[in-house]
Amino acid sequence: MITDPGVDDAFAIIYALLHPELDIVGIVCDYGNVSQPVAIRNTSYLLNLAGRGDIPIIRGSEVPLSGSAPKLFYDIHGYKGIGGVDTTGTPSPPLHPFHKIYQLIELHGSDLTIVNLSRLTSLAVAFIQSRSLIDKVKDIIIMGGAFFVPGNWTPLAEANIYGDAKAAKVVAKHGTNLTFIPLNVSNRAIISNSLIYSLSTQSHTPFSPILKTVMDYYSNKYKEIIPGINGAPLHDVTLLSYLTNKEDYQLISRQVFVIASGPAKGMTFADFRPVPEKVPNYPVNKMVLDFNFEKFQQDFVTILSAARFYH
Ligand code: RIB
Ligand code: CA
């Protein structure tokens, strides 16, 4: 998992930790919603809550490929941690260097799925350093892009793509086992506050006590972004839910292109004409443009209610 927690990333990590069929073998922490050190701290906080300090935390990217300081989004995701939860007292965890990613690929190979929930910088670096190795993993699922729908950073661009559009272009141009889950799906993965409140009171997992505080902060911000919204989209959770519920997600195959600079920077596009024109020497990958929201919501409740943990 490559992540920048961040509220929806935190829910994705919680979901994966509680899921009986998912096994997290490592978490790469990147900048994005928050700085890389804060992403590390927030990840460690969640792993400690679950008693899963055994999961390696890997130091990912601190800045985009351009080397410039990234724009961060504490206003949406929390100044002291994850939403309203203060994680500042979390002890620094042992950190694994970037090449731990390659060791994990060597170890798990075609059993391993990489789930990218943040900017694509670390993934692009892995493509540049070790393409043949990256090609060995089963799948690379990317939260990113917007097709025929507005972006969420600019009118045209989704945040994970815009945040390092050069990196996204490298990945889209060279990846052969990619699945994009864009805003078309993730914007619709809206979980209401009342659902979170009932989970926080009726479920008994190590995360139940923090769910409301995490969500309240984020959903209050979302009310400013999307007036009238009832809850907030948990973008990153859709990728984890997709892994074990593929029948609820409609996959199509397309060549995916990224605009890396200029006024349309971060825009993603594909040829949706009935007979798409195939660009030579460019990979055909997969994307999901539609899903069954009711099933997603049901699955989210089932997994977050699970009493898989001892407490
Ligand atoms: O555009 C949504 C994506 O950007 C999510 O991954 C969110 O956490 C932010 O990183
Ligand atoms: Ca994210």
Image: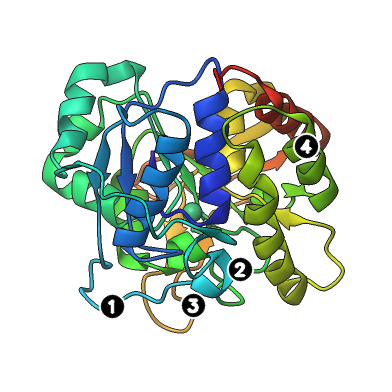
Secondary element type, mark 2: loop
In the displayed structure, does residue 112 sit left or right of residue 60? right
Q: Quadrant of the C terminus?
A: top right
| Left or right: 52 as drawn, with respect to 225 | left
Marks 3 and 1, how far apart at CA: 20 Å
Point 53% across, 54% down: residue: 270
Identify the disc placed on residue 201. 4
Instruction: Spot the residue most to the bottom.
Output: 263
Residue 159 locus on image (x, y percent): 50, 65
**Mark 4 or mark 3, earlier in chain:** 4
Give the alpha-carbon distance from disc 4 to disc 3, as whole Å: 45 Å
Q: Residue at x 28, y 67 (%)?
A: 64
Q: Residue 233 in the image: x percent, y percent?
A: 69, 54
Secondary element under disc 3, as helix, strand or loop, is loop
Q: Nearer the viewer, mark 2 or mark 4?
A: 4
What number is the disc on residue 264?
3
Whether residue 274 can be seen here = no
Label disc, if present, on residue 151 of the rendered structure: 2
Front residue (pair 284, 56): 56
Q: CA distance from mark 1 to mark 2?
A: 22 Å
Quadrant of the image occupied by residue 260: bottom left
Name the residue beneath numbered marker 1: 69
